[in-house]
Image (cartoon, rainbow, N blue to C red):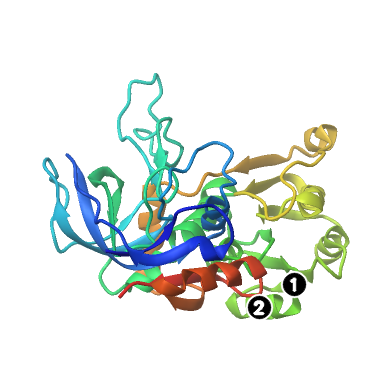
Amino acid sequence: MKAAVMRRFGGPEVMEYGDIDVPKLGIGEVLIKLEAAGVNRFDTTTRKGEIPYAKVQLPHIPGVEGAGTIVEVGPGVKAFRAGDRVMPMLTISSGVCEHPVCYCGLGFDNICADFDKLGLTMWGTYAEYVKVTQHNVIRIPDGLSSIDAAGSQVAMATAWELAMNRCKLRQGQTVLVNAAGGAVGSAAVQIARLAGCRVIASAGSDMKLDRARQLGADETINYEKQDLLAEVKRLTDGRGVEAVVETVGGTVLQQSIEALCHNGVLATAGSIGRAKVEVDIFRILRKQIWITGTHFGPKETNKTVLRLLAEGKLRPVISKVFPLKDAPAAHTMLESRDFFGNMVLEIA
């Protein structure tokens, strides 16, 4: 099969387009012929070998999300058959375990105690084929393209988890969405608007803020030119926002905590900048602030997002579609941060 294969760590050029063996199926596994693969920041850190909690075995195929059609099922597979249009889950959970608390059984398969990760501890989606267990596959609704589905898992499902399941957004609230030009941020703007919230979007460029307004943002803040906290206070008559969807980190994270009103909640899924910052715990106590996070989204959240996309209530924000052979160019564009939304590889 054709794939973008890493045989060493480094820059985008280490992904070499060429032939490699198709994965062989084991018990309970399915083989998916991919039509598209999402391009994510996680893929770039894997490419560089900068994952602190796992070791990538070379040669390796990156890619944490994708979409396609099942072409073969292994022994014991009962839930799926050849011809099913599906999306593999990026957090590969065990489904059942011997731990006192089974997170998969509680619906939190995204934090399975024994999980693997697609595109990290196992070959990913920058290829014509990928294999996963039947427990880690979900169906794609009719009418939704593979391109749109492939770009939904990291962006839309994570944003939904942050906005709806962590912040629990309600109609009439004011929410601050940081990094509104990124994959998660651009999705969160749409979701907050769908929930009936007043949306304040922040980003580091005026172009991204203009696009955020097109997605439904009511107010915008350029945190490279303006003081984020001061602007939020001005736009809320000094009260602050009920919720923040945050993926920037560093100073922006610190200012976002201060920008919350009493009983406000900040939900994060990572950071572009510094991940470690000082936080005044007494400010959190006095204002009764909630700080929470998510490790991507569980299967049920992904199913919800796919349904809403198929119904047209949400729309994917695809900046550019590259052919698989141009995966290095996609990574170069991703690391430049000169884009809006997310990118997808089309696999012929």
Q: Position of residue 237 (x, y in %)?
A: 85, 62
The crowd level at tag 2 (other Cα within 10 Å; few <14, some 14-19, many 20+) is some
Q: Does 49 sit above or below residue 98? A: below
Label 1 element class: strand
Q: CA distance from mark 2 to mark 1?
A: 8 Å
Q: What residue is drawn where x is 56% and y is 47%?
A: 49
Q: Is residue 336 left or right of residue 124?
A: right
Figure quadrant of residue 235: bottom right
Figure quadrant of residue 193: bottom right
Mark 2 touching mark 1, by CB under 8 A?
yes
Disc 2: which residue: 213
**Disc 1 residue type (three-letter):** Thr
Q: Position of residue 200 (x, y in %)?
A: 71, 66
Figure quadrant of residue 234: bottom right
**Disc 2 residue type (three-letter):** Arg
Asked whether 257 or 243 is in front, the reply is 257
**In the rendered view of the protein, which quadrant contains the N terminus?**
bottom left
Q: What residue is drawn where x is 75% and y is 78%?
A: 206
Label 2 element class: helix
Asked whether 302 or 286 is in front, the reply is 302
Label tally: 2
Disc 1: which residue: 220
Which label belongs to residue 11? none
